[in-house]
Structures are given as structure tokens and as C-alpha cells.
Amino acid sequence: MTSSDATEPAAGPLHAALANIVATRLLAWFDRHGRHDLPWQRGITPYRVWVSEIMLQQTQVNTVIPYFDRFMARFPDVQTLADAPEDDVLHHWTGLGYYARARNLHRAARKVCEAHGGVFPRTPDALCELPGIGKSTAGAILSIACGERAPILDGNVKRVLTRLCAIAGDTSRGSTLERLWTLADALTPAERCADYTQAIMDLGATLCTRSRPACALCPLAEACVARAEGTPTLYPSRKQSRRLPERRCQMLVVRNPAGEFLLEKRPATGIWGGLWSFPEIDHGADPATACDRITGEAPGSLHHGTVFRHTFSHFHLDVSPVHIRVPGLGRHVLEDQRLAWYKPGQRALGLAAPVKKLIDALCPAGART
Ligand code: SF4
């Protein structure tokens, strides 16, 4: 029998008793120690909460803050976002990663405007029909922006709950996930839902951290089974780590006589979907032939740069940059909508992260004209 079988409270009176303790202590802690001045906590609207929640998936608060501020300055409301070109949205996401989030955000904004008259729906089911919004994000929008009783279960909350009740098992699937949702629902109070939601997220982010939980400072310490067992960091159960496969490619860093870079818009799906990138060719392909085929220009000069690694969630990509100068503007580039000459700082385009890094290295901001 696992510790979870023995200690997790059954639904009903035990959940109710725990809920009472958790809400009371957590809210008192939140009033004194919670985060109350994050940008999305000012002028709260469903739109601002939604954008912040999507940005905060897989990204730390401190990283998100400047992105959120820039995004709100450019897209202050859902209609502005819906009306914007995708390139502009991706440009404001460049560097945050997981670009499907930005594409879904844009699609969802259009759907809110087209199907809901620019007003976010007020039910979890209707919110979950919008691209990129799952049950937890819907719960966050409804509780934080609308004050409704709606549970959330993001990564921070999963960590707190698995420790609080010593729940073992893979938290992303099946019965474990179901148990966590039942618990999250039972613990969410009817009053002060917005504060409770923010409080449990804050607890996970600031005290109940992944590798060094500060149990001595935690308002839930007396109720926490994992702390009593002395094993908080065993929860949530670790997924079996697997060795990521490795792939290799070459990126053609082509520049014309004006110093502009050749970029290619990637297909909407797949890695860096919808972003602009250097043309990519197979590791064993001939870059000179590829340059001729893609641009209509033979290279004036060509040299190989230093190989670097970019890691995705499911594989490593080893990129060999090939630096090429071409003598003209290339007839194919001028004819093809998916190809463009790009001068840094002069055009808002969403760039794949390694592309931005290479351009910044070759063309530092201070040296741009
Ligand atoms: S007592 Fe420790 S492990 Fe338990 S919820 Fe608090 S910080 Fe997390």
C-alpha cells in the first residue's frame, strides 16, 4: 500500500475538515505574505488574467513580467489582439518559447470576438472550447477575474496537493489526475475564491518549491502529510526520465549586400510553427546548392560557423550555421511570400529563438542602423 492509499482523505467529511483548515490558514498567510503587486493583478479583467496564465505556463513569473507589460502595451484588449497580424503577436512572444501558446492565444481572441461579441464566456465548458484553454486556465480566469468558485490545478497546485495528502502517481494522467481534481475542488472555498486561487499558486511558487520546500514557514505544515513523513520532495512522483533523441541540421545564414538576413516563414504546424527562421537544410546537404535553389543566387562567400544545440521538450537539435554572402537580392526571394530580407529592428516578426540569438550575435542592437 502506498502512503497515498493510507493518508489521502476520502471525499466527504474529511475533505470538508481539511478544506476548512487549508482555506483559513492559506488566506491568512496570503494576506500577509502573498504577492499582491504583479502586473496582471492590477486592473483585473478576464483578458489580462488569461494572457498572464498562458504566459506563465512553463515560464517563471520574473521572466513573464516584461513580456506581459509589452504585450499589454501593444494588445490592450481582446479586440486589438484579434485584429493584429499573427506575425505581430509572434514577435511579442519571441523569446518566451512554446509558440503554440501564442498562436492559440491569437486564435482564441478571434473566437471570443467572433462568437462571443468580445466578451469572455463565464462557464468552464465554454472557456475550454477556446484554443489553448484547459480546465485549470478556465478555473483561474473564472475565479481570479470573475470571483466565481472554480478550482485550478496548475503545476504549482499539483505540487502542493500531492504533498499535502502524499498522493503518489503520475500527476498528468488517469486516476491520479482525477483524485487531484476532486481534492482541488473540495478544498476551494465558496468565499474569497480569487484570493484562494492566487494564494495556493503563490504557496507553490514561493514556499512549496520543487527541490527545497520551506516547510518551517508554511501555513499548511501541520496538515501536511508529506512533511510529517519527512518526504516532501518525493512528491509529485517523478516521471521516468528518458534520453532525448538527437537530430542535426544546417541553417543557412544568408546575407545580401545591404546586410539583410534571409528568413523563411515556417509552416504553421511543427517546431517554431508560423515563426521566421533561417532556411534549414539536412545535415549532409550541400549549402551552396541549397542557397542557389532557395534564393536564385550562388554564394559569393561561404563559411561554417560553430555548431550549437537547441533543446526541445522531445529532442535535441544540433544546428550547424553556414554563413553565406550573396551578391544580389535573389529573384526567388523577391517572388516568394514565404521568404523575406530582414533588417533587425526594422520589422516586427516572430523569430525562432536560435535565429534571434544568432542575429543578435552577428548584429548587436547598438550596431544597427
Ligand atoms: S509543509 Fe512543506 S511540503 Fe507541505 S505544503 Fe507546506 S511547504 Fe509544501
Image (tube, grey):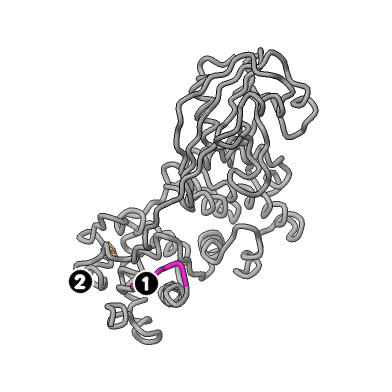
Examine the rendered structure and indicate whether residue 368 appears above or below residue 354.
above
Residue in view at x 62 percent, y 19 percent: 255
Residue 235 horizontal/vertical position (percent): 31, 66
Rate crowding at label 1 as few (under 14), some (14 to 19) or many (20 or more) other CA atoms within 10 Å.
some
Q: Quadrant of ligand 1?
A: bottom left
Q: Identity of the amino acid at label 1?
A: Gly
Rate crowding at label 2 as few (under 14), some (14 to 19) or many (20 or more) other CA atoms within 10 Å.
some
Q: Which mark is residue 65?
A: none
Can you identify the residue that label 2 sits on? 228
Residue in view at x 34 percent, y 84 percent: 14
Residue lying at the far bottom in this picture: please name it: 13
Residue 273 horizontal/vertical position (percent): 63, 45
- In this rendering, would 255 be left or right of 365? right
| Disc 2 to disc 1, C-alpha distance | 19 Å
Residue 245 horizontal/vertical position (percent): 46, 50
- Say which label, 2 or 1, has the lower sequence index: 1
Residue 75 horizontal/vertical position (percent): 64, 42
Residue in view at x 49 percent, y 41 percent: 317
Q: Nearer the viewer, residue 114 or 279?
A: 279
How many numbered markers are drawn?
Answer: 2
Secondary structure found at label 2: helix
**Magenta stretch contains residue 172:** yes
Q: Identity of the amino acid at label 2?
A: Ala
Can you identify the residue that label 1 sits on? 169
- In this rendering, would 206 be left or right of 229? right
Q: Nearer the viewer, residue 98 or 299?
A: 299
Which dot, 2 or 1, sits closer to the camera? Answer: 1
Q: Which residues are magenta?
A: 168-173
Q: Quadrant of the C terminus?
A: top right
- In this rendering, would 325 be left or right of 217? right
Quadrant of the image occupied by residue 187: bottom left
